[in-house]
Image (tube, rainbow, N blue to C red):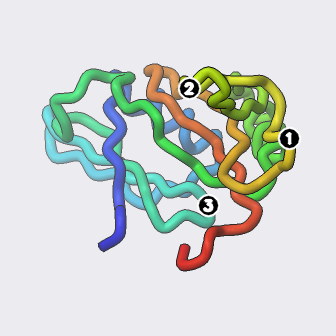
Amino acid sequence: MKIEVLVIPVADVDRALHFYQGLGWRLDADYEAGPAFRIVQLTPLGSECSIHLGRGLTPAAPGSAQGNYLVVNDIDQARADLIGRGVEVSEVFHHVYDSGVQERVYGPAPDRRSYASFAAFSDPDGNGWVLQEVRERQPGR
């Protein structure tokens, strides 16, 4: 099994379409079947998973899609690219668990190991995206 599509709930389809195309994502489809249904599919370059946004797709509230991960090879470069496109992106951070609870610490993971450095941003509706740096995949991935 593979994850093929994530549904991202938005309030304004055209605003969301403009935002995601502004990230450089490919527009795959834009189909409208009357005032109650529209489906737009976009795919991040290099990804096998797309997103759907539109009208009549989900009862989820706009902005309620959180923790969607985008894997990148170089988090600093990906962050700079998004900022260059006008997106507000958090500083790079990593997590520590010294207190037994996950704590966010700013700066990349000290050893720059894969899967450990992050940055975050949101679309205009507040749907949350996380950049995760993966320089070397774990075996079998």
Give the percent coordinates (x, y) of residue 36. Answer: 14, 33
Q: Could you tell which of marks 1 and 3 lies nearer the N-terminus? A: 3
Disc 2 marks a residue whose amino acid type is: Gly
Q: Would residue 24 be found to the left or right of residue 73 on screen?
A: left
Q: CA distance from mark 1 to mark 3?
A: 29 Å
Residue 12, quarter of picture: top left
Outermost residue on the bottom side: it is 140
Q: Could you tell which of marks 3 and 2 lies nearer the N-terminus? A: 3
Give the percent coordinates (x, y) of residue 98. Answer: 67, 26
Camera-side mark, 1 or 3:
1
Residue assigned mark 2? 100
Q: Examine the rendered structure and indicate whether residue 29 appears above or below residue 123.
A: below
Residue assigned mark 1? 110
Mark 2 and mark 1 in contact (Cβ < 8 Å)?
A: no
Disc 3 marks a residue whose amino acid type is: Leu
Q: Residue at x 42, y 31 (%)?
A: 66
SS state under label 1: loop
Towards the viewer: 106 or 119: 106
Q: Residue at x 35, y 49 (%)?
A: 6
Towards the viewer: 82 or 74: 74
Q: Examine the rendered structure and indicate whether residue 100 appears above or below residue 72.
A: above
SS state under label 2: loop
Q: Examine the rendered structure and indicate whether residue 22 appears above or below residue 71.
A: above
Camera-side mark, 3 or 2:
2
Q: Would residue 110 be found to the left or right of residue 35 on screen?
A: right
Residue assigned mark 3? 45
Q: Would residue 43 be found to the left or right of residue 29 on screen?
A: right
Disc 1 marks a residue whose amino acid type is: Pro
